[in-house]
Image (cartoon, helix red, strand yellow):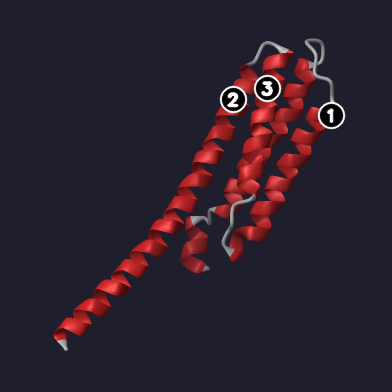
Amino acid sequence: MKQRFAQLGLIITLLFSTFVNSAEIDSIDLKVTMKEMRLAYTQAMKSTSADEFTSRIDEMSNMLAVAQSYNFSPDRAEMSNQGLNKVEAILHSIQQTDVTEDNLAIAKNKLEDIDSLRKEYHKKSKPSVWQLIFG
């Protein structure tokens, strides 16, 4: 009987650890993707040529597609996807423009809107201390 309980405990532990590990992997992948997007954003903002800027925008667009495929928790899915869709709209509008050396500064100004969205949606996704205390 004790052996059965030990086996059952082992099975439950293995199942639980598999669930937790897969959740952590998904989370880590999204964090890595977002950090890569942030790096591409920074590099685009520092770029001095239209070609380099366009290349970084394309990188961001590819990483955005990965982020959009992420399976967000039900309580955060709508808000997260809304933010990602706004980022997509900005990137798409930049990609529709033929970015040249002459209009590079204008394209960078459009790109700054993405950083504003990042701040806004990170603030929305992380509750304040007061919200945690008082609900």
Amino acid type for the residue under numbered disc 2: Thr
Check contact, mark 3 vs mark 1: CB within 8 A. no
Question: Which residue is located at x 65 percent, y 24 percent?
Answer: 56
Residue 76 is drawn in which quadrant? Answer: bottom right
In this rendered view, identify the residue nearer to me: 83 or 54.
54
Is residue 111 in view? yes
Local crowd size for mark 2, using a 10 Å CA cut-off: few (<14), some (14–19), many (≥20): few
Question: Which residue is located at x 52 percent, y 62 percent?
Answer: 131
Q: Position of residue 9 (x, y in %)?
A: 25, 76
Q: Which mark is residue 96?
A: 1
In this rendered view, identify the residue nearer to me: 93 or 127.
93
Amino acid type for the residue under numbered disc 1: Gln
Numbered marks: total:
3
Q: Name the residue that disc number 2 marks.
A: 42
Q: Which mark is residue 44?
A: none
Local crowd size for mark 1, using a 10 Å CA cut-off: few (<14), some (14–19), many (≥20): few
In this rendered view, identify the residue nearer to me: 49 or 9.
9
- Describe the element under mark 2 as helix, strand or loop: helix
Residue placed farthest to the left in the image? 2
Check contact, mark 3 vs mark 2: CB within 8 A. no
Q: Which mark is residue 55?
A: 3
- Describe the element under mark 1 as helix, strand or loop: helix
| Distance in Å between CA atoms under marks 3 and 1 | 14 Å
Amino acid type for the residue under numbered disc 3: Ser
Q: Tell which circle, 3 or 2, labels the residue nearer the N-terminal end.
A: 2
Q: Tell which circle, 3 or 1, labels the residue nearer the N-terminal end.
A: 3
Mark closer to the observer (3, 2): 3
Question: Which residue is located at x 15 percent, y 85 percent?
Answer: 2
| Distance in Å between CA atoms under marks 3 and 2 | 13 Å
- Describe the element under mark 3 as helix, strand or loop: helix
In the image, residue 51 above or below residue 23:
above
